[in-house]
Amino acid sequence: MALRPGAVTQNKIDFSRSFWDKLIELPLSSATTYSDEGSLMIETTQTGSNERVAAVSGGTANERFIGVAISDYRRITDFVNVERCTIPATSAYTFQLNKTTPTAATFYIEDITAAGTPWTNASPGAPAATTQYSVTTGGLVTFHSADAGKTVDIRYTYTPTTVELQSRFHERPVVAQAQSFFSQVAIAVGYCEIYTTMYNTANTWTVGAALYQGASGKCTTTNTGAQIIARVLSIPSTTDVFLGIGYNVSPGVMGW
């Protein structure tokens, strides 16, 4: 069953349509204090013991991807939102984001009639030309007057408020976050299709594109680390904030 269009994102993985062949459980590296739900995980060795352990990807070269973390831990500083707006026809050509705690440098704005062509972020200055915009720390987006009347999609990362966190997750059970105590994490391996919000919202995403391991365990299109042998299954939209990814990984083997 797919996520209903417009439904609230309750997790960083949409479990209603994600699946995997099996889960393996590995100890976390001593340098990894937790594993966020949906994090891209890499295999490494524990300093001093040579033990095979898991760590969150850092987006650096020669990292060995081993799967996505299936975890109940959710970092509260990077949730995703996608909004659509029609730029006002008259001054001041502004739009107030629904989430007022946006993260700088995470924005992707495009005209809905020219999908895949990102606009230019002029922050903190004012937009000086068409297809430019600026964003304040409170989430007020300002557009250039030449773009009045256009309809755009805005994708960004934000920090949820305390009220939003409580409405989403309520009080966590005493058995939650066991991996933080036992220093273990479950990782989805084999053929997997994962619908996740652990991705760089500022990237241009296209179906079928290759994935790379980014910083903080996030998917990225930037080739700064080892390429994940994976593909994009679906791209985020105003009705579905999840990025769909497919990969096939087994010990010692990576492929479709």
Image (tube, grey):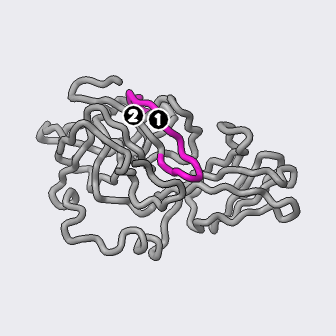
Please tell me the numbered disc located at residue 8.
Answer: none
Residue at 77% over, 46% down? 131
The residue that label 2 is drawn on is 246
Q: Tell me, yes or no, if residue 11 can be seen here.
A: yes
> Could you say which quadrant of the image residue 36 lies in?
bottom left
- Give how far across and how far down residue 196 sits, in percent: 42, 47
Asked whether residue 42 appears in the rendered view, the answer is no
- Would you identify the image quadrant in which residue 252 lies? top left
Element class at badge 1: strand
Q: Amino acid at mark 1?
A: Leu
Q: Is residue 142 left or right of residue 16?
A: right
**Mark 2 or mark 1, which has the lower sequence index?**
1
Q: Are marks 2 and 1 in contact (CB under 8 Å)?
A: yes
Which residue occupies 47% across, 58% down?
79
Q: Nearer the viewer, residue 10 or 159?
A: 10
Residue positioned 69% across, 45% down in the render? 110
